[in-house]
Image (tube, rainbow, N blue to C red):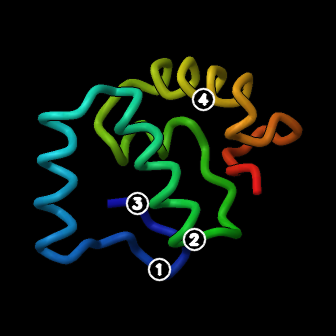
Amino acid sequence: MLLLGKTSLKSTGYDEEHRISNTAYKRSYERIIDAIENLTESYPDYPWTYREVAEFCGCEAETAIRISRELKKQGILDKNTRHLRICS
C-alpha cells in the first residue's frame, strides 16, 4: 500500500479485485497507462515517480520508465517534468 503522508491508497474490495485482474490479463503497456491515469486523477498534485507507478501496477521500474519514455514521445505525458504528468 502506498502512503502519502497521512493519506493512504487503500482500495475498496472492487478496486483491489480490478487491479488484480488488470495485473493478470493486461500487458504492461496498458497497466502503466491505467496506473498513471488512476493515480494522477486520484492525487493530481502528488509527484508520482516511475517506481511508485510500477509498484502500483505490478511491473518493474525499468518497464515503467521505458513505457513512459514512449508516452512522452507520443505527447501523452509531459516531457518537461521529471515526474509523471498527463498532458492536458
Residue at x 60% of width, y 43% of height: 49
Q: Are marks 2 and 3 in contact (CB under 8 Å)?
A: no
Local secondary structure at mark 3: loop
Q: Which mark is residue 68?
A: 4
Where does label 3 land, which residue?
Answer: 2
Where does label 1 land, which residue?
Answer: 7
Residue 11, horizontal then vertical, whole percent: 25, 72
Q: Amino acid at mark 3?
A: Leu
Where does label 2 land, which residue?
Answer: 43
Q: Amino acid at mark 4?
A: Ser
Distance in Å between CA atoms under marks 2 and 3: 12 Å
Q: Are marks 2 and 1 in contact (CB under 8 Å)?
A: yes
Q: Earlier in the sequence, mark 4 or mark 2?
A: 2
Residue 25, horizontal then vertical, whole percent: 14, 34
Residue at x 44% of width, y 66% of height: 3
Residue at x 11% of width, y 60% of height: 17
Left or right: where 36 falls relative to 16: right
Left or right: where 75 falls relative to 4: right
Q: Amino acid at mark 2?
A: Tyr
Distance in Å between CA atoms under marks 1 and 3: 9 Å
Query: Which-is-in-front pick, marks 4 and 2?
Result: 4
Left or right: where 31 falls relative to 20: right
